[in-house]
Amino acid sequence: MEKLKTIPVHIGIIMDGNGRWAEKRNLPRILGHKEGIEAVRRTVQASIKYNIKYLTLYSFSTENWKRPKEEIEFLFSLMEQNLKKEGENLNKNNVRVRFIGRIWELPSNLIEIINYVENLTKKNTGLNLIFAINYGGRTEIVDGIREIIKSGYRVEEINEELLSKFLYLSDVPDPDLIIRTSGEKRISNFLLWQSAYSEFYFTKVLWPDFDEKDFLKALLDYQRRKRKFGGIIEK
Ligand code: IPE
Ligand code: IPE
Ligand code: MG
């Protein structure tokens, strides 16, 4: 077995394919989401095991409001239940849980548990587990620009560094690796600004089937990449 040498500091995952996982089994789509929670659990465990510092999980996009009301409500209640259930456990594992997106637009019960878990785990120094909920990359950039204008910056002061400070993850390094499951090869409005130089890994595995073995495959693939950031590699 190939050895792990370079480990990504920050991994982002577009957790896709829950619906298709259920449809293949003639089950309602929501059961795919339920099973997807198990994959989240396995991925968090694997991230701890492989010493990943930041894991960002795309859980609900600003475009996912286009789905049927019942599916949306189910997703939110699933998040609420599982955060309640896992909060203490994550805390014991030294995980710091954070959230990005327009959190204030979510149902109040979910906001409550989000605030609770964020607060409970805020001093932890292990894995930073970031859930992107009601998140959209374009919205994030627009919101950041609005804040810059409100704060009264002059045109000459606006640069990449300043805008980065006004985005959600201003203290978090850009993702080194972005994984998307289910075979789709697109970004779907995830971390648009931050992914400028990310490596992408696509797998056909549907999210509810994703396990430690698949995670490791992505890590091994990542370490074979030659990252150049526009420069050249010195021989
Ligand atoms: C990803 O699975 C979960 C969310 C977007 C919330 P999907 O629900 O998009 O699954 P498919 O793409 O329909 O299979
Ligand atoms: C992206 O998946 C959003 C999340 C995983 C939360 P979608 O299933 O919503 O993306 P599209 O519609 O196929 O691009
Ligand atoms: Mg999908």
Image (tube, rainbow, N blue to C red):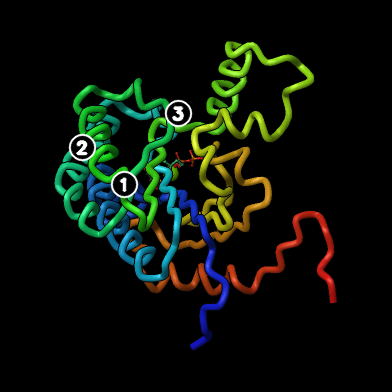
Compare residues 186 and 2 and report the one nearer the observer.
2
Identify the disc placed on residue 62. 3
Rendered location of residue 148, percent (x, y)? 61, 18
Q: Earlier in the sequence, mark 2 or mark 1?
A: 2
| Looking at the image, residue 25 lies above or below residue 62 | below
* Dot 2 alpha-carbon crowd within 10 angstroms: few under 14, some 14 to 19, many 20 or more: some
Compare residues 131 and 121 and report the one nearer the observer.
121
Real-space Cα separation, disc 2 to disc 3, in angstroms: 18 Å
Look at 41% across and 39% down and name the residue there: 132
* Dot 3 alpha-carbon crowd within 10 angstroms: few under 14, some 14 to 19, many 20 or more: some
Element under label 2? Answer: helix
Rendered location of residue 196, percent (x, y)? 67, 46
Amino acid on which the number 3 mark rests in the picture? Thr
Rendered location of residue 47, percent (x, y)? 38, 63
Residue at mark 2: 80
Look at 58% across and 46% down and name the residue there: 186
